[in-house]
Structure formats: structure tokens, C-alpha cells
Amino acid sequence: MADPLHERYMKATRAHQSHEASCSTCLPGTRCAAGERLYESFARLQDAYLAQQRKRG
């Protein structure tokens, strides 16, 4: 059975990476508004997923 949190985390990762690769405004440490939103979503889901993995042991 697929883990819904993992699927959302991977989707957010792809969206962030895709945006970063195509946005001429985004630079490491400096992002446009859309890039910042995508990064924050990715980071939040990554934190949640890693916390879930630590709980599973």
C-alpha cells in the first residue's frame, strides 16, 4: 500500500525542482514568490515524512 505522505512529499519535490530548473529569478537562497511557496511546501512535507520514518523506527 502506498504511503500518501510519501506521495505528497515526492510530488512537492518534483514541483519544486521543476520550478527551480525553469525559473530565471530563483537562485540558491533567493526565490521568487512561487518558488518560495513550492520550497516551503516541500520542506514542510519532508519534515513530516522524516518524522514519520523516525517514529516507525
Image (cartoon, helix red, strand yellow):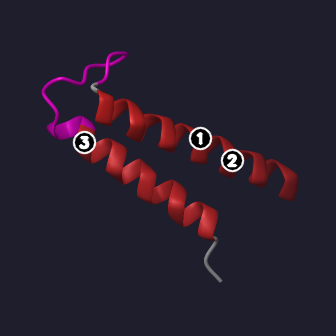
- Disc 1, SS: helix
Residue 57: tell me if it is visible: no
Mark 3, secondary structure of its residue:
helix
Indicate the amino acid at tag 3: His
Residue at 61% in and 70% down = 4
Image position, residue 39 (x, y; %): 43, 36
* SS at badge 2: helix
Image position of 13 with respect to 33: above or below: below
Residue wearing tag 2: 48
Specify the label residue 44 is tagged with: 1
> Farthest residue toward the top?
29
> Which numbered disc, 1 or 3, marks the residue that appears first in the sequence?
3
Q: Is residue 50 visible?
A: yes
Q: Say whether disc 3 or disc 2 marks the residue closer to the N-terminus.
A: 3
Q: Amino acid at mark 1?
A: Arg
Whether pointer 2 and pointer 1 mark residues with C-beta atoms closer than 8 Å, the reply is: yes
Residue 42: give x, y in percent of width and height: 49, 43
Residue in the image at 65% along x and 83% along y: 1
Main structural element of the magenta stretch: helix, strand or loop? Answer: loop
Mark 1, other Cα within 10 Å: few <14 / some 14–19 / many ≥20: few
Residue 34 image offset from top left, x and y in percent: 30, 36
Q: Which residues are magenta?
A: 20-31
Task: Indicate whether residue 28 is drawn in magenta.
Answer: yes
Q: Which disc number belongs to residue 25?
A: none
